[in-house]
Amino acid sequence: MEKILIGRNGFLSQAMQRADGDLIVVGSADFDLLNDEPKALESIDGADILFDTADFYPGVKVTSENPVEVYEKNVQMYETLFALARANNIGKVVTIGTTGCYPITDELLREDLFNGDASKLNQKLVSYALSRFTLLDIAALYRGNFGIEHSHLVLPNFYGPGDRYEMGRSHLLASWVRDFQTAKETGQDEIELWGPPTQRREFIYIDDAARYTLALGQMTLAEEVINVGTGTTPTYKEMADTILKVLGFDGKLKWDLDKPVARNQEVMDTSVMQRYAVDLPAPTDFQQGVKLTVEDYLNDRAS
């Protein structure tokens, strides 16, 4: 089976390349979804599956300040993506979603909540979320007119080696690793965190995300939108305690309960995915994943 990967340097893309050395990778230097016209490319013509990890997400602050730009650029990329698939006779497109595009609720996030209702979305990310709903409309047109199949895999918070650790660009767990280590090195004896320690978030180790994406993307799925998770749902306190233990830091945690909290938990219902779980690899243990993330951060700084 010939598989194409759009996106070369992203967090998930790098992990997918580690997981499958047979992927044909198309980076922005080869084809730019924002600036190039769809055309036949010899390297991908007639491939079975096109995995897309590219999108336009400049961070929460910029997204909230420039919602129209974020929406328009993402929709442009999706339109070009499917036109590219058609021009190269590709039978299936797999795109990646995020739990940030689900409405704000404490109930389990089911696929039927991914429905385009903007009234309950995180308003700072509403344009980004709406571009994902438009993606499903674009996919429906290409499926109905040209027979191109589509799977949209919704994943939770990424963590693991290879993350960006810069302020404002890292994922949640990586940002805590950076901040906790900084507190340790500067002699702080207390770390302040927002909201209650009982908040619960779902995480997926980046190499698990890559392997699950590749495995599910190659299956015949009855559903278009599928939540992809490994059941890793620590509370904020459990996550903080794990990081402190790995860092060997005995700093105290201070929970600022006056800070606003959008939701008490962000956990997916993965019962649909479990129908296909017999073919999926075992997930990475959370403590081991945190250990590898910390080692990666310390090595990244040293180099």
Image: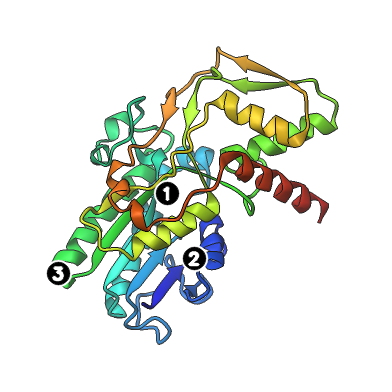
Foreground: disc 1 or disc 2: 2
What amino acid does circle 2 point to? Answer: Gly
Residue on which the image places disc 3: 145
Q: Residue furthest top?
A: 258
Query: Residue visible at 35% across and 51% down?
Result: 277
Query: Residue visible at 40% across and 33% down?
Result: 267
Instruction: Give neighbour class at mark 2: few <14, some 14-19, many 20+ (Cα, 10 Å).
Output: many
Q: What whole-number distance in Å separates the C-alpha atoms at marks 2 and 3?
A: 26 Å
Residue on which the image places disc 1: 70
Query: Residue visible at 30% across and 53% down?
Result: 276
x and y, in percent, of residue 1 in the image: 36, 77
x and y, in percent, of residue 216 in the image: 35, 59
SS state under label 1: helix
SS state under label 3: helix
How many numbered discs sit on the rendered protein?
3
Residue 229 as seen in the image, left or right of residue 134: right
Instruction: Judge by depth and name the residue closer to the eye, 130 or 175.
Output: 175
Residue 7's tag is 2
Instruction: Judge by depth and name the residue closer to the eye, 284 or 149.
Output: 284
